[in-house]
Amino acid sequence: METPSSSRGFWLNVLHFAKWCGNIIVTAWLVIGATLLLIIGLELVCSFGSRIFSKKEDPNYFKKVESYRNEPWVDEYFREFMAALKTTWQSYVYFRWEPFKGKYLNINDRGLRFTVPSDLPDSETTKKINIFMFGGSTLWGWGVRDRYTIPSQLVEALAKHKVKAEITNFSEPGYVSTQELIDLIIQLQRNKVPDLVIFYDGVNDVYAAYQSGVAGIPENEWKRELEYNLSNRYGKLRRLFLLSSLDEFFLGRKIKELSQKLELTSMKRRNIDGLQKEIVEIYLDNLKIIDGISKAYGFKTMYYWHPIIYFKKYLTNYEENYNNDEEMKNLYFKTYDILQQEKPYLARYNFYDISGIFSNSRQSLYIDCFHVNEKGNKEIGERIADDVLKIINNIK
């Protein structure tokens, strides 16, 4: 039988336990509250300090391009470029830019960069030719106005030789040669058959392999994998939401920057030895496939590997800033060297390696490692025009 004293002792123990739990909860809340106050205080101090002490840089990095300094069009071009920087899903090839209308940058309803048409009048002596061009951001026209993209410059150069070219620029920033092949197939399925197809490649096939450690896949493939798995992996979706929320805070942005650097470092640790051979093999396989398709549909083909800053002997002080990634540079050198070894095989195709077109130039021609300024694009357009004129008589 329970006595009053034992009952009293039980409730005293319950009371002591409750007080102990209460103390734990209060202490926990104090620690959490103090931590939150510390984080908020640190955020305010860092955010306020960064605004006061950090050097405010002009976000328009095109103004820093040596050859564009003091050019009156650069500010408006940059505003248009940033406003146009929106992509939409595209089956098989992942994405296309959304339509945009501007003074210097225009993208049509199909997501294709505008090519300035030929103003050459029709006449009995005028040769007409329909050309498709495929490539990445260099052919798309990164950092140049519509009139100075390589396709527009090719139109202009051919017009001087009484050739009226209608060029469709199917290039897209980041595309690799396999995406271009797929895009060509899509156009042919739609009964759009050109007289000539020109592929302008090299950079993205190498860079995509360098980025992932795997040859033959598109750039940023790890992002596609993450996006695909979001629907059935709630944890990853939550993580992506949290990462996107970090942009609202100074500390969050720094954490995100660190995370991205670690991700990039992890990518660079992947084995890239021997990738150069696989890159070239996959590219050559694509050429074989395109060659078979061209014979079946009756159009001619031309292939280019374009210039990059690593092959320019005389760099300006500005260009030297983009010549510092030794690992990536070595992969490009090795890949282009292997391509040179394939010249006997490539002789059966209309293949042109113009990686050294600016080798001996002392002018500032690059925007960054891969993208060429408007003057450089003019030279490239004229060079391609010379090659086109050599085979144009074989085009019906």
Image (cartoon, helix red, strand yellow):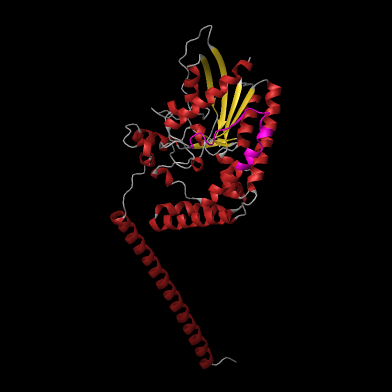
Q: Which residue is painted at 53% across and 56% down in the image?
A: 265
Front-most of residues 53 and 327: 327
Residue 350 magenta-highlighted: yes
Q: Dividing the picture into quarters, in which one does residue 255 lie? A: bottom left
Image quarter (top left, top right, bottom left or bottom right) of the C terminus: top right
Residue farthest toward the left in the current orientation of the protein: 52
Whether residue 346 is visible, yes or no, is yes
Front-most of residues 90 and 179: 179
Q: Dividing the picture into quarters, in which one does residue 299 lie? A: top right
In the image, 302: left or right of 369?
right
In the image, 364: left or right of 266?
left
Front-most of residues 119 and 392: 392
Total marks in image: 0
Image quarter (top left, top right, bottom left or bottom right) of the N terminus: bottom right
Residue farthest toward the top in the current orientation of the protein: 124
Magenta segment boundaries in residue numbering: 337-359
- Where is residue 225 shown, x and y percent of the image? 61, 48
Residue 346 magenta-highlighted: yes
- Where is residue 181 shown, x and y percent of the image? 63, 32
Above or below residue 379? Residue 394 is above
Front-most of residues 56 and 368: 368
Above or below residue 47? Residue 373 is above
- Where is residue 338 shown, x and y percent of the image? 64, 42
- Where is residue 215 shown, x and y percent of the image? 64, 45
Above or below residue 123? Residue 221 is below
Q: Which residue is painted at 53% across and 8% down in the image?
A: 125
In the image, 78: left or right of 333?
left
Whether residue 219 is visible, yes or no, is no
